[in-house]
Image (cartoon, rainbow, N blue to C red):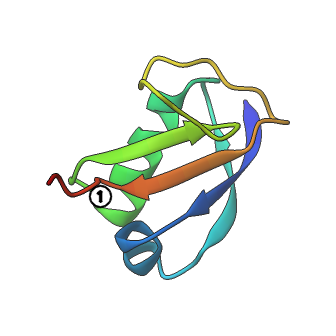
């Protein structure tokens, strides 16, 4: 189990009703964070995950010291 701090931005922060929280996840990858968000907040929408200020895929391995940010899907244009 890994304990990490996750920061929320945009619509994700509105849905979670917070800008940051500490969560415990079983697996140390970004997919586990996405699963937590879906289960806890019903976030079925597509979101972007940034690890240490870089956008990553859902298969990215994370460590407890990483900075994790969850962002709303960007609008195209």
Q: Position of residue 36 (x, y in %)?
A: 46, 47
User: Compared with residue 48, is residue 1 higher up or lower down, i.e. above or below?
Assistant: above
Residue holding disc 1: 43
Is disc 1 surrounded by few (<14), some (14 to 19) or many (20+) residues within 10 Å? some
Query: At 57% across and 24% down in the image, what residue appears?
Result: 29
Q: Secondary structure at mark 1?
A: loop
Specify whether 11 is left or right of 13.
left
Give the residue furthest to the left: 77
Query: At 50% across and 67% down in the image, what residue appears?
Result: 9
User: Compared with residue 28, is residue 33 higher up or lower down, i.e. above or below?
Assistant: below
Specify whether 64 is left or right of 54.
right
Q: Quadrant of the C terminus?
A: bottom left
Specify whether 26 is left or right of 38.
right
Query: At 57% across and 78% down in the image, what residue appears?
Result: 18
Query: At 24% across and 47% down in the image, what residue appears?
Result: 46
Q: Position of residue 54 (x, y in %)?
A: 59, 34
| Residue 22 placement: quadrant | bottom right
Q: How many marks?
A: 1
Give the residue furthest to the front: 77
Q: Quadrant of the N terminus?
A: top right
Q: For this rendering, which residue is in front, 76 or 20?
A: 76
Q: Position of residue 48 (x, y in %)?
A: 39, 44
Q: For this rendering, which residue is in front, 62 or 37?
A: 62
User: Compared with residue 52, is residue 40 higher up or lower down, i.e. above or below?
Assistant: below
Specify whether 34 is left or right of 29.
left
Give the residue furthest to the right: 65
């Amino acid at each position: 189990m890994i304990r990490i701090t996750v920061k929320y931005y945009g619509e994700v922060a509105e849905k979670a009703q917070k800008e940051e929280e500490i969560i415990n996840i079983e697996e140390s990858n970004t997919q586990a964070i996405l699963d937590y968000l879906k289960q806890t907040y019903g976030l079925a929408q597509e979101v972007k995950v940034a690890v240490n200020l870089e956008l990553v895929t859902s298969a990215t391995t994370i460590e407890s010291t990483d900075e994790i940010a969850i962002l709303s899907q960007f609008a195209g244009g």
